[in-house]
């Protein structure tokens, strides 16, 4: 297996995968005289690369040297997506060539931008960090994005979601090339939730405000301050000085949601904060965020986060 390393990649997404695969080797012992995973780092020049945090990682070989890999993993990075993709054109072309030779490609977090840039994800399923979904969809319109998934396996391409999903990717590879028992053992050693299948619980709704429509921004700000009351559409229209039809059209264009859907998202985000930081019952939280029907809000919360309120509190509570 190869790990493609490059300037500004995330050091933990390289060393973390190496660590967990090395432990898998230790736990499994030699198979036919060989380790389960034989891993090399590969850089464009064969020289060490400087990660975004200033830490340098050594390279075992350059992309020009011959290597024998069944899979090449692409870690994520910290930096501007466009700059990274422009700078790594040679590496991207090399990855494309490796795929054509029958070598599988895997990526985690925004490493999926590099993977998609090779063109191999066309008409295939993939994922990336929840905060990068819009940019990923906009840039790669022919990729079938599955935003909620932690791992998307297409056989010869494997896509993992954000940052620490590299652990889940490593466990996936251990199970595929070793066994389910070995993957479970490694997950316990590293305290990794091997059952994590979706990233929806980790999402924080990004309230879009850079659309340039000042009337709609007024409406958004009003909704964010008044989510606790019984909101009517004519109130939002009055605040924005727009007719209802104009409000609906421009609000959807600016935010991607209708005003009432936006209000639901505001209420769910506030409920999440209360579950994380307060010892309130879910009934109390429901009323505090402007809902009267606890059952209805319970269903909405679960559909938005993928977890029941009690499961969400158990996972993220700070108290």
Image (spheres, grey):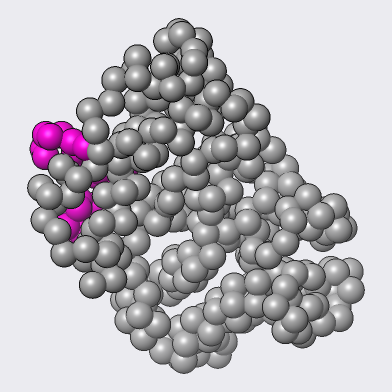
In this rendering, is residue 252 above or below 54?
Answer: above
Per the image, is 252 magenta?
A: no
In this rendering, is residue 166 above or below 141?
Answer: below
Residue 126 can be seen in this image:
no
Q: Main secondary structure of the magenta part?
A: helix
Q: In this rendered view, identify the residue nearer to me: 193 or 201.
A: 201
Going 49% across and 13% down the picture, which residue do you hit? 242
Going 35% across and 14% down the picture, which residue do you hit? 234
Q: Quadrant of the N terminus?
A: bottom right
Q: In this rendered view, identify the residue nearer to me: 128 or 175.
A: 128
- Horizontal and vertical percent position of residue 112: 63, 53
Q: In this rendered view, identify the residue nearer to me: 186 or 266.
A: 266
Q: Quadrant of the C terminus?
A: bottom left
In this rendering, is residue 147 above or below 105?
Answer: above
- Left or right of 304? Residue 250 is right
**How many marks overall?**
0
- Horizontal and vertical percent position of residue 312: 25, 58
- Horizontal and vertical percent position of residue 245: 45, 8
- Left or right of 184? Residue 160 is right
- Magenta residues span 290-312
Res 103 quadrant in image:
bottom right
Going 35% across and 54% down the picture, which residue do you hit? 201
- Horizontal and vertical percent position of residue 18: 58, 81
- Left or right of 180? Residue 74 is right
Q: In this rendered view, identify the residue nearer to me: 309 or 255.
A: 255
Going 43% across and 71% down the picture, which residue do you hit? 171
Per the image, is 292 magenta?
A: yes
Residue 296 can be seen in this image:
yes
């Amino acid at each position: 297996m190869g790990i493609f390393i490059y300037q500004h990649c995330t050091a933990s997404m390289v060393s973390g995968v190496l660590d967990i695969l090395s432990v898998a080797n230790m736990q499994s012992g030699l198979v036919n005289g060989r380790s389960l995973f034989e891993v090399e780092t590969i850089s464009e020049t064969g020289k060490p690369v400087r990660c975004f945090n200033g830490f340098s990682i050594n390279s075992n070989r350059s992309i020009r040297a011959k290597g024998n890999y069944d899979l090449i993993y692409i870690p994520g990075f910290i930096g501007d997506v466009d700059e990274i993709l422009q700078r790594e054109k040679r590496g991207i072309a090399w990855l494309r060539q490796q795929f054509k030779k029958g070598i599988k490609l895997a990526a985690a977090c925004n490493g999926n931008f590099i993977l998609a840039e090779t063109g191999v994800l066309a008409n295939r399923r993939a994922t990336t960090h929840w905060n990068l979904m819009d940019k990923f969809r906009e840039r790669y319109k022919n990729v079938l994005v599955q935003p909620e998934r932690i791992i998307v396996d297409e056989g010869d391409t494997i896509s993992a979601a954000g940052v620490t999903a590299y652990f889940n990717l490593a466990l996936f590879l251990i199970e595929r090339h070793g066994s389910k028992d070995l993957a479970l053992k490694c997950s316990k050693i590293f305290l990794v939730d091997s059952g994590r299948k979706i990233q929806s619980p980790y999402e924080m709704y990004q309230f879009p405000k850079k659309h340039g429509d000042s009337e709609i921004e007024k409406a958004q700000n009003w909704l964010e301050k008044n989510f606790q009351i019984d909101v009517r559409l004519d109130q939002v229209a009055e605040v924005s000085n727009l007719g209802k039809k104009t409000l609906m059209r421009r609000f959807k264009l600016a935010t991607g949601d209708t005003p009432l859907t936006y209000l639901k998202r505001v209420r769910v985000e506030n409920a999440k904060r209360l579950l994380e930081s307060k010892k309130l019952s879910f009934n109390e939280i429901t009323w505090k965020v402007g809902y009267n029907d606890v059952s209805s809000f319970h269903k909405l919360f679960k559909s938005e986060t993928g977890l029941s309120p009690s499961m969400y509190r158990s996972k993220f509570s700070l108290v």
